Amino acid sequence: MPSFLTSSLFKNSSIYIITDGISQAIPFLLLPLISHYLSPADYGIITNFNVLFAILSIICFMTTAGVLPVIYYKKDKEALRLYISNMLFLNTIVTVGCLVMTLIFNRTIDHLIQLPLFYQILCLVTVWFASITNLNMILWRCEERPWSFGKYKIALSSLNIIITIWFVVILLWGWQGRVYSQCIAIIVFGAISLWILIRREYFVLKISKQDMLHVLFFALPLLPHALSFWLKSGINKIYLTDMCSLSENGLYSVALTWGGALSMFFLAFNNAYAPYLYKKLSFWETQSYDTTYQDKIRLVKMTYICLLGTLLISFLAYWVSLFIIKLTYAPSYFASIRFLPWAIMDVAFNGCYWMFVCFLYHTLKTKLLGAITFSLSIAQIGLSYVSILWLGSTGVAISAAFISFITFIIIAYVAMRSYRLPWGLKCTNKTVS
């Protein structure tokens, strides 16, 4: 049997892919059903709630979460416990700050995405609980416990779909029922995650200014980088709501949902690949060049194989998505097909990007990463606006795919220069460090 098939990376990534696939398939299979109970405009409102959830998640916890896999292998249990606790304290402080800003600007938010104040506050509460679950699940990834990670995600998705069926299909609560089901499931599992962290002694009531500053040092430069991904999709949805209609926003979001299903497949692999890569890079830094050269060549070859696999899987995903939409969705959603090829291409290029961005995280070049991705996202804001004027609503999907391709190319080039490996497979010892 090939050594790759028996490696921990292959085993763990297989578990992540299978369990992630199940957890995503559970609510995903629900979409054709609820499409018969929700209009595209209703789906547009749900999409806008998720847009707000996404940007609040970035600000409140997503940028801080990236540091945990990097420092996990560098701290002992006691220091790690204090660090994780202060990550949670910092996330809480930022969430309270966002609550204050929401109360001040709630009318502007309502105007942009047609979401009343009550749902804005509900979104913030849900984000705080999601931050706890996120920390808990990153810990399981770092500990290489894919089964714990996977079972938890499946359970969360199962609760989500059960409540959704009750609220939307049985009680006929419309878009509000879908929003409530998402929030209840996340809040319940956030509370469970907090209990798990306390039980495992990863939560202590002790403030460490040094740890908070370290998290901020890592996270703040990443904020533009993280916001760049929100800008790429969130601004497009706001454009569609304001310049076209809620229905067009809903149709675009259906296509993005299929892209999101593919993205979860790539993310599942990355959940195993990132800790594997960080561990290797940390080990290589303690070894001489001669003892690691062949291992580096194997990593480069694996990266190229994964890039090719990403493109092939994306091609197949498009045809599968097209078939299922025509087979199972309500006819009012068929117009979403015109967005589909661009949504799949967008995800494919993001999947390629993930293969390289870890090198920039490891070398702590988050400022450079943030500058690149944020600049390109600003460019997309203008490109999307012009594309809508020239090409109609489909223009936002085309611009998103184009910017994702450019982002992948630039980040791959910078990563190769930041952490030099034998990318050409013909490098001599003197050209690789």
Image (tube, grey):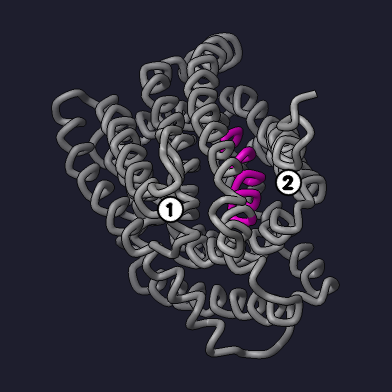
Residue that appears at 47% across and 20% down: 333
Name the main secondary structure of what is drawn in magenta.
helix
Query: Is 273 part of what is drawn in magenta?
Result: yes
Measure the alpha-carbon separation of dots 2 and 1: 33 Å
Q: Which amino acid does label 2 sit on?
A: Lys
Above or below, comparing residue 99 to residue 228 in the picture: below
Q: Is residue 185 left or right of residue 97?
A: right
* Quadrant position of residue 398: top left
Above or below, comparing residue 189 to residue 413 in the picture: below
Local SS, label 1: loop
Query: Is 317 part of what is drawn in magenta?
Result: no
Highlighted range, magenta? 264-279
Q: Quadrant of the C terminus?
A: bottom left
**Label 1, on which residue?**
419
Above or below, comparing residue 72 to residue 5 in the picture: below
Q: Which amino acid does label 1 sit on?
A: Tyr
